[in-house]
Amino acid sequence: MDKNQLLKMAKRAFPKPKRTRDEVEATSAAVRNAGDLEVPGLEALRRPGAGNLTEGPASPSEAEVFGLPRTDVVDKRLQDGASALDKISKGDTDLTQGEQLGLEAIVLLFGRPALLVQDGDFPEPPEEWKQLNGKRDMLKGIFPSVGRVDLTGHHTFEWCGTAFLVGEGILMTNRHVAEIFSFKKGAEWPLTAGVKARVDYKEEFQRDVAQEFKIEKVLGVHPTYDLALLQVAKGTKAKKSPVPLKVSSKAPKATKDGELAVIGYPAFDSRNGRQEQLDIFKNIFNVKRLQPGKSTGLKQLPEILGHDASTLGGNSGSCIVDLETGNVIALHFGGQYLKGNVSVPIWKLAKDKFLKKFAINWV
């Protein structure tokens, strides 16, 4: 990561660097004293398995933090990051290479984490995001309505993005996700011959239970925004569908520095740094995650909402939830890893000609 971009992100993530420095030092001391990584400051961030997905459970001392199993290496990263925070708090931006690596690790672990969702819940968040505990019930009510778009019969992809329920039998995702399994034919978007699409509302790490529903067709694609609506099979008495999410028709209180959460299925993305992705996502991809961050402002023509959560390619089609209200405020559609992201500000489309044709669950 470019140093200037890293410093900019650190400033956003840690408005009180001295306080964060104390938290990092406490975590580092706990790692040294415990002799392993099973300490409160890292428990939520510690990989719950061994070196790869095919191996059995690991002992706590073998589990990974940002891709590194050895506690002495972890401690070194944390110490270097704490040193960087010391400098930043004094206005000093002359960081060594080790301090830059340490600062990046701290941003990933404390500032913009990507928390695994398992059994419809998330683990204890890092100190910088303790407020998520107060939103736990709200978020647990949202997770079941966000799914992964899976494909059968496609020549390249087994799955292609995220989608979420915005109405009875209506999923919202990106146009570029829908284009992977459908094509434009006049005013219609028929599915590609031989390809079947479905949404799985589970797809959690180390959980085998699926909750799949057939995607029946593409209802339509927005003429301007990277947005598409899909018709998904409705539930039955034996197989209930999740409830549609609440979609905000009003702007959030803040479009800059407002707290939000991306919920989706980040995938390994060859466009971004390999080691950085392995560091924060622990070599665990394609499963549901909670990715908190902050909005970075609205831009014009067409209007888009920026945010700084840690996202990857599979997050295309993820919902962005306002952490104050629990309402969906935006549709994530792209960005650069730990540099900046762009999303469709859905409240701006509450009276949109395209969306008015459908029964969206506006609030």
Image (cartoon, rainbow, N blue to C red):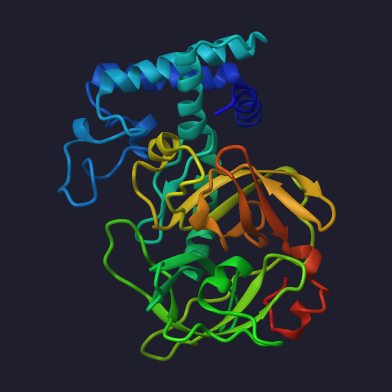
198 or 249: nearer the viewer: 198
Q: Where residue 103 appears, x then y in whole percent?
A: 51, 22
Does any portion of residue 127 appear in the rendered image?
no
Residue at image coords 28%, 62%: 207
214 or 239: nearer the viewer: 214
Does any portion of residue 100 appear in the rendered image?
yes
Please determine whether, in this image, residue 350 is positioned above or below residue 61: below
Please determine whether, in this image, residue 19 is positioned above or below residue 354: above
Q: Is residue 273 left or right of residue 204?
A: right
- State which quadrant residue 304 falls in: bottom right
- State which quadrant residue 211 falls in: bottom left
Q: Where residue 336 appears, x then y in whole percent?
A: 59, 43
Please determine whether, in this image, residue 56 is positioned above or below residue 43: below
Q: Where residue 292 appears, x then y in whole percent?
A: 56, 45
Judged from this view, the residue extending furthest toward the bottom is 237
Q: Is residue 341 left or right of residue 337?
A: right
How many numbered discs sit on the rendered protein? 0
Residue at image coords 60%, 26%: 10
Quadrant location of the N terminus? top right
- State which quadrant residue 42 falls in: top left
Q: Is residue 162 left or right of residue 25?
A: right
Q: Where residue 95 appears, x then y in whole percent?
A: 55, 11
Q: Is residue 83 left or right of residue 11?
A: left
Quadrant location of the C terminus? bottom right
